[in-house]
Image (tube, rainbow, N blue to C red):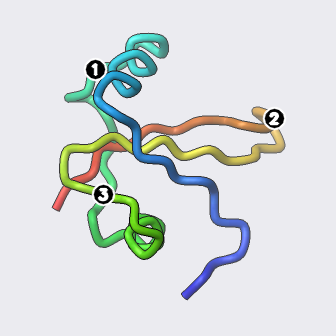
Amino acid sequence: MKWNNTPTHEILSEAQASRELRLIGISYERLPLIKYEDAALAALRDEGIETKAGSVVRIIRESKSAGSGFRYYRKIIL
């Protein structure tokens, strides 16, 4: 199923994740979690993008209060 207004989900490389998490001042261990079965991650796998457990996902969404391009980070779990 394809949802309307689904925010952009991107899998980060280890180096990208380390750099971006350091910039926002959060450690990998303290990241919120996202399940491997999440529909947005399934859509990435359908596109041929690997989404393995332990990877960091950057979610970019529009926000009326925060403006455009607001970023969230999640760690994939099984």
Q: Residue at left 40%, top 25%? A: 16
Q: Which image quarter holds the N terminus?
A: bottom right
For label 3, the SS is loop
Closer to the chain start, of discs 2 and 3, is: 3
Q: Quadrant of residue 63?
A: top right
Q: CA distance from mark 1 to mark 3?
A: 20 Å
Closer to the chain start, of discs 1 and 2, is: 1
Between 15 and 59, the one lying in front of the other is 15
Q: In the picture provided, is 75 more to the left or to the right than 54?
A: right
How many marks do you count on the picture?
3
Which mark identifies residue 27? 1
Q: Residues within 10 Å of mark 3 (few under 14, many from 20)?
A: some
- Residue 63, compared with residue 17, is above or below; it is below
- Residue 45, compared with residue 19, is above or below; it is below
Which mark identifies residue 67? 2
Q: Residue at left 42%, top 76%? A: 46
Q: Residue at left 63%, top 78%? A: 3
Which mark identifies residue 51? 3
